Structures are given as C-alpha cells and as structure tokens.
Image (spheres, helix red, strand yellow):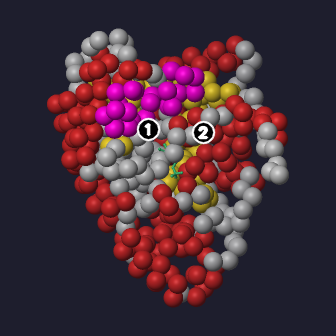
Amino acid sequence: MSFAWTPDRFNRRVQQISQPPRALPSPPEIVSLAFGSPDPRLFPAAGLAEAAATALRDFPAYSVALQYGNPIGNPVLLGELAKKLEKDEGRPVEPGSLTITSGSSQALPLVFQALADPGSPCLLETPTFLGTVRHIRFNQIEAVAVPLDDQGLDVGAVGAALDTLSAQGRRPRFLYTIPTFNNPVGMTMPLERRLALLDLCARHGLPIVEDDAYRDLWFDAEPPPTLHALDRHGLVIRLGTFSKIVAPGVRLGFVLADPAVIERVQMFKAEGVTNGFASLVVGTFMKSGGLASHIEVLRRDYQGRRDALLSALAREMPDGVTWTRPTGGFFVWLTLPPQADVARIAARMKEEQVVALPGTECYPDGRGSHHLRLAFSLQPPERLAEGACRLGRAIRAGLHK
Ligand SMILES: Cc1ncc(COP(=O)(O)O)c(C=O)c1O
C-alpha cells in the first residue's frame, strides 16, 4: 500500500504556487528562445579542466575547498572576486562585504529573508526576472509594482509609490531593480537616472537590491557604473552570478553589500561553504586570467547573436509589433499590438515549434499578456533567424482573422 500524499500533507503555500518554467533542453526540431541559458558550446570547459587540475595539485588550497568550510565562501574565489569587483567598481571591497552563494538564485531569497518580514511590502521593478517574482511570493512579501520606461526604472513612480505607502503608514523594506541589461526588457538605466534613484532612496532610507547578472556582457559600450559603485550611504546590495560568464552548473553567485547586511544574510545560510570545489576551480580560472579573456569571447559572440536576432525581427515581424534593442545581456522584449489574439498566437507558436517566455511570467500580477521575452543566448545566429521567421508566422496568424 502506498502512502496517500494528499494536499493537506503539504505546506499551505504549495497549493498557491504553480510549477516554475524549467530551462530544460528541448528537442532539435524546436527553436527555444524562452530561457536565458548560455550556449553550451561557449562553456569554458578546457579552461576549467586546467584550473581543476592545477587546483587539485595544491594541497592547502584543495584541502580547504573540499572540507566543510566558512559559509562566507572559499578564500581563493573570494580573493579573486574581490580583485575583479574592485577593478570593475573603482572602489575597495571592504572586508566582510562579500559572500558567495549558490548562484544568485540563492542570493535572492537570502537577501529577501534578511530584509523583509512576511506581509511587509517591497517595491518591485516590473517587468522583472521571473525567479524574483517567485522568491518574493515564497517569502510572502507584498510586491508593489513600479514600472520601467525606456530608460529603466521610473524614479517618479518610485517616489509616488513611497508616498502612497507612507500615507498608509507603511514603509517598503527594499526596492528590487536590474538596472543593467535588464531581464526581461534588455534596457540599461543611464547614469543621471542612477544618481536620481540613489538620491531618492537615500532620502527615504530605502535599501536597493541591485541584481547585476549581465553587466560583463556589454556589446556596444561599457555600461554606466553599478548603483553599488555610486552609492555613498551603504544602501545598495549588489547580487552577481557566474552563470552567464562561466556556466550555470558551477552554481556560484555572490552578494556585495555593507558588512552589516552580509552578517544578517549569513544567518539564513544553513549550509557550510557554498560549492567549495566549484569555487576553487573558478577562483583558479580567474587567477590564471582565463575568465577575463573568456568574457571577451562571450561579448563578441553574443553581440553577433543579438545582431542576428534584431535583423531577423526587422525582416519577419508584421507591422504593429515592436521590440527593444539591447546593448548587452541576453534578452529582447517584444510587444504585440493591443488587437493581437494572444491565445491564437500561443497555439500557432506550438504548431510552429518555436518557444518564447510569456510576458505574464515577468509580472507579479498577471499583466504582460501582450509581451514575449526572446533570449538570444542559447541559439546560434541561423537558428535565431529561423525562430524569428516561425514567430513572425505565428504572430501574423493572431493579427489577421
Ligand atoms: C536578473 C537575474 N537574476 C538572477 C538570475 C539567477 O541566476 P543564477 O543562475 O545565478 O541563479 C538570473 C538568471 O537568469 C537573472 O536573469
């Protein structure tokens, strides 16, 4: 007889949560533009193999990495990452201001748990990363949506949301934003707007969670400094990941923030060291200069894919469809005209064997039905062109009845 795993055996929240979309490999006949997965052909396997061999010959280093260790992270990776961040941000990384996480997917809930109680509000830039929407929901935080415009988060709308909450006697615990090569829209907040946002948040004492997954992957020009680099008040908590510049499978990310924040974040990290072995390998790869040159290769390659997708969209999309032109990162955000029959388009996309992420996944409140996120990271240029062609046919079917 088997045990009856009836719904009442589970946490009540399980019943309110849908299965997350999963970035699983799709069969070759399908063109998937749905997920921000890097192309496996771009994984630095040879560099990591060499780094692993070197690391495993160095006794004190591997004995630390393979042991249960300090939850802050492996010392080799912490040292190399601090050097990179100091160079990128042009300011020193203070002792105690960095912790390694299992991808930024672990950093998100750790930071949210450290900052917010269940039921408390946060300001959430929308549309946003679907993982963030889920982590906010899991932690029972109330998301107050703040819109983006073509220059990123609308600072006036942040001010208005703060006023509305204040009139109710409430204070948001943090603001979440992806200011550089945003997921899902692909746009970047200019410097002046970054400064205006920091000024507003400093006046209100509002912590900013800056999710910075794509910064290294710029194509046309280096992006403006991170909010963290510009912050003079210790308000910005920067999250980063090695998923897009090394490989998602190394499961390494980090939090860079005021040591008082890192100390609280650590309290929610129940494991010992995070991915000690992968940390040592990636730290060794960085030490050899391998990561810096790999990032150069990725920039050129993803730029070619971005260009291929944009020119295919220009060829294939019917009138009335618009899309963003990212200057870095992985994503293009497509907007369908209001009269588009989205159910019919979704059905035709299935027939055409082309997949994109529905815009509704990127909002906490069901909006986004007339948007699709297209990732150009996984498919080579010719497949991106084929995907745009299939998508064009599906959209045309939903525009003309
Ligand atoms: C904005 C953003 N944050 C966080 C993540 C999660 O990345 P990781 O692979 O480090 O968990 C992603 C991945 O797509 C992302 O786009």
Earlier in the chain: of badge 2 and badge 1, it is 2
- Where is 364 relative to 264, above or below? above
Asked whether 329 or 156 is in front, the reply is 329
- The quadrant of the rendering that contains the C terminus is top left
Give the crowd class for mark 2: few <14, some 14-19, many >=20 residues within 10 Å: few
Q: Is 256 on the left-hand or right-hand side of 330? A: right
Q: Residue at x 38, y 70 (%)?
A: 45
Q: Are marks 2 and 1 in contact (CB under 8 Å)?
A: no
Q: Residue at x 58, y 27 (%)?
A: 364
Farthest front residue? 1
Q: Which residue is mark 2?
A: 19
Q: Which residue is mark 1?
A: 183
Q: Is 69 on the left-hand or right-hand side of 281? A: right
Kindly indicate the quadrant of the structure image that contains residue 47. Answer: bottom left
Q: Is residue 374 visible?
A: no
User: The disc labelled 1 sits on which kind of residue?
Assistant: Asn
- In magenta, the rendered stretch is 346-367
Q: Is 264 on the left-hand or right-hand side of 257? A: right
Q: Residue at x 75, y 18 (%)?
A: 169
| Residue 32 lies in the magenta-colored region | no
User: The disc labelled 2 sits on which kind of residue?
Assistant: Gln
Rounded to the nearest angstrom, the CA distance separating label 2 from label 1 is 20 Å
- Where is 201 relative to 11, above or below? above
Give the crowd class for mark 1: few <14, some 14-19, many >=20 residues within 10 Å: many
